[in-house]
Image: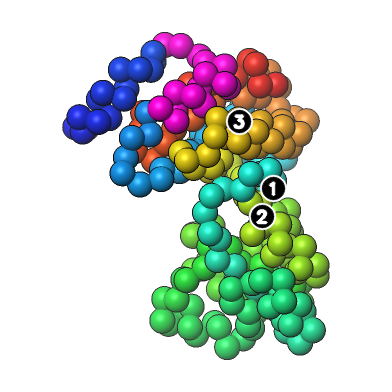
């Protein structure tokens, strides 16, 4: 893969063989984020889990103390008083049955997170085939199926992110923007790691965090020493 001049130049600052501690990794990933836009800083965490086993699935959500730096658009499926509550809490879109054809037929996806009250899951379930592959299906473990729509909307707006294993047993999540201070990024990263360590399935033996990498949207990746994160 051919890399641009900026990438090649930035990559020289990073020793591929070194496992950095968090402070150094954050500092490097910020320095090497040289694109003209405010790059997203992401963490990629490879675990010792085998996601084929139901008892080794990891899925949850955590509120990052400094948010993600991204404006999140929330769609809430609710009715009556709960719909009014969602609107008052700051949800971008609120509705029910009438949104199904809009999403299914008009390919409307002007939202980043979907929240639903439990009584609306029958309706939302009909969208499983379109929401599922995009990772937008509400889930009780992530706190997106709930009667407390006010809390759900406020937490998501404040920087709540969902983490889950992908098919290769890796978790990919944003931890902020390149414009954040090193302290803010380190804080967010540590909060995420603490949540993932807490979610460690009891059946996973040996080293839990196999590899941890921080990277910016366009920059090179920086390896973090996983032994210092448990």
Give how far apart the Cα atoms at labels 1 and 2 are: 7 Å
Q: For this rendering, which residue is in front, 45 or 63?
A: 63
Q: Magenta residues: mostly which secondary structure?
A: helix
- Indicate the quadrant where residue 92 lies: bottom right
Measured as percent of width and height from the top left, residue 80 is found at 76, 87
Q: Residue at x 31, y 25 (%)?
A: 10
Give how far apart the Cα atoms at labels 3 and 2 are: 18 Å
Looking at the rendered image, the disc whose residue lies closer to the viewer, 3 or 1, is 3
Measured as percent of width and height from the top left, residue 173 is found at 54, 42
The magenta stretch is 17-31
Q: Residue 71: give its label.
A: none
Q: Residue 158: give its label.
A: 2
Sequence-earlier tag: 1 or 2: 1
Q: Where does label 1 land, which residue?
A: 63
Q: 21 above or below 188? A: above
In terms of secondary structure, where does tag 3 sit? Answer: helix
Q: For this rendering, which residue is in front, 126 or 46?
A: 46
Q: Residue at x 55, y 83 (%)?
A: 99
Q: Residue at x 25, y 31 (%)?
A: 6
Q: Is residue 155 magenta?
A: no
- Indicate the quadrant where residue 188 lies: top right
């Amino acid at each position: 893969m051919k890399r641009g001049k900026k990438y090649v130049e930035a990559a020289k600052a990073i020793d591929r063989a070194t496992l950095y501690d968090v402070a150094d990794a954050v500092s490097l990933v910020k320095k090497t984020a040289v694109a003209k836009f405010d790059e997203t800083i992401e963490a990629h965490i490879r675990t010792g889990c085998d996601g084929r086993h139901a008892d080794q699935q990891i899925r949850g959500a955590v509120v990052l103390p400094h948010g993600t730096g991204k404006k999140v658009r929330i769609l809430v499926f609710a009715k009556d008083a709960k719909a009014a509550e969602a609107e008052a809490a700051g949800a971008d879109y609120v509705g029910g049955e009438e949104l199904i054809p809009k999403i299914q037929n008009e390919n409307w996806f002007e939202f980043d997170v979907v929240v639903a009250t439990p009584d609306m899951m029958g309706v939302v379930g009909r969208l499983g085939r379109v929401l599922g592959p995009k990772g937008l299906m509400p889930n009780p473990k992530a706190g997106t199926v709930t009667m407390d729509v006010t809390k759900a909307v406020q937490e998501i707006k404040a920087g709540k992110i969902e983490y889950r294993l992908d098919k290769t047993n890796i978790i990919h999540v944003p931890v902020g923007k390149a414009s954040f201070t090193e302290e803010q990024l380190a804080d967010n990263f540590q909060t995420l790691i603490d949540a993932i360590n807490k979610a460690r399935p009891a059946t996973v033996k040996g080293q839990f965090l196999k590899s941890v990498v921080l990277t910016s949207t366009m920059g090179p990746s920086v390896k973090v020493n996983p032994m210092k994160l448990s």
